Image (spheres, grey):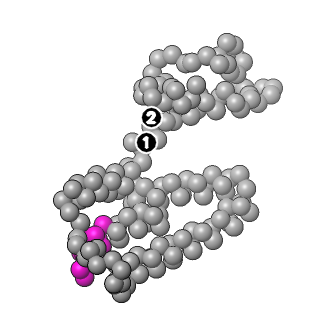
Amino acid sequence: MIMPIFTVLFLLFTFANIAVPGTSGFISEFLTFLGAMNLNPFVAISASIAIVLAPAYALWFFHKVSYGSFTNYLPTIYQDITAKELNLLLPLLFFTFLFGLYPQIIFEPLHLSCLSLLHLFIPAPPGPARGAGGPWPPSGARGRRPQGHLYPYPFLIGVLY
């Protein structure tokens, strides 16, 4: 093996790409598949073909790049990752596994923001299903930015309104 650090990092990022549990790719692929299954099971089942074919291609590609034969057209590529490149890739690797092991870091700040956005576009159920809480959404709430702790991160306000 000529480039061991590159190969290990490439393997770990390939695992994130093919949605191995414990990586951020698994969380995103699982939630996308779960949402698709709730909306249209036929689309979700037909999309599951990609869940099988994409890892097969990614692992084949990893094998060809890492253990394939060398070409004479790229003679200077035989050096391993430099310290500058390693300093660039290690934070990406850290966050890949952090968000895969603890996705609540992303979900908690976005939860209330997404709920308030959904309340603007999804009409209330008719009749007594609203409960005793009165009209939904409250009068005057449409188009008005909620006050208080609903937006702990100000950069989300520009995205939602």
* Residue at the outermost top position: 140
The answer to whether mark 1 and mark 2 are in CB contact below 8 A is: yes
Q: Residue at x 47, y 60 (%)?
A: 26
Q: Residue at x 41, y 81 (%)?
A: 64
Q: Residue at x 52, y 26 (%)?
A: 158
* x and y percentages locating residue 18 in the rendered image: 47, 67
The residue range painted magenta reads 1-9
Q: Which residue is mark 1?
A: 106
Residue 148 appears in view = yes
Q: Amino acid at mark 1?
A: Ile
Residue 135 sits in which quadrant? Answer: top right
How many angstroms separate mark 1 from mark 2 (CA)?
Answer: 6 Å
Q: Amino acid at mark 2?
A: Pro
Relative to 146, is 81 above or below?
below
* x and y percentages locating residue 82 in the rendered image: 20, 63
Residues 49 and 111: in front is: 49
* Residue at the outermost front position: 73
Total numbered badges shown on the rendered structure: 2
Secondary structure under tag 2 reads helix
Secondary structure under tag 1 reads helix
* Residue at the outermost right position: 127
For residue 109, the mark is: 2
Q: Residue at x 23, y 70 (%)?
A: 80
Residue 5 within the segment the image draws in magenta? yes
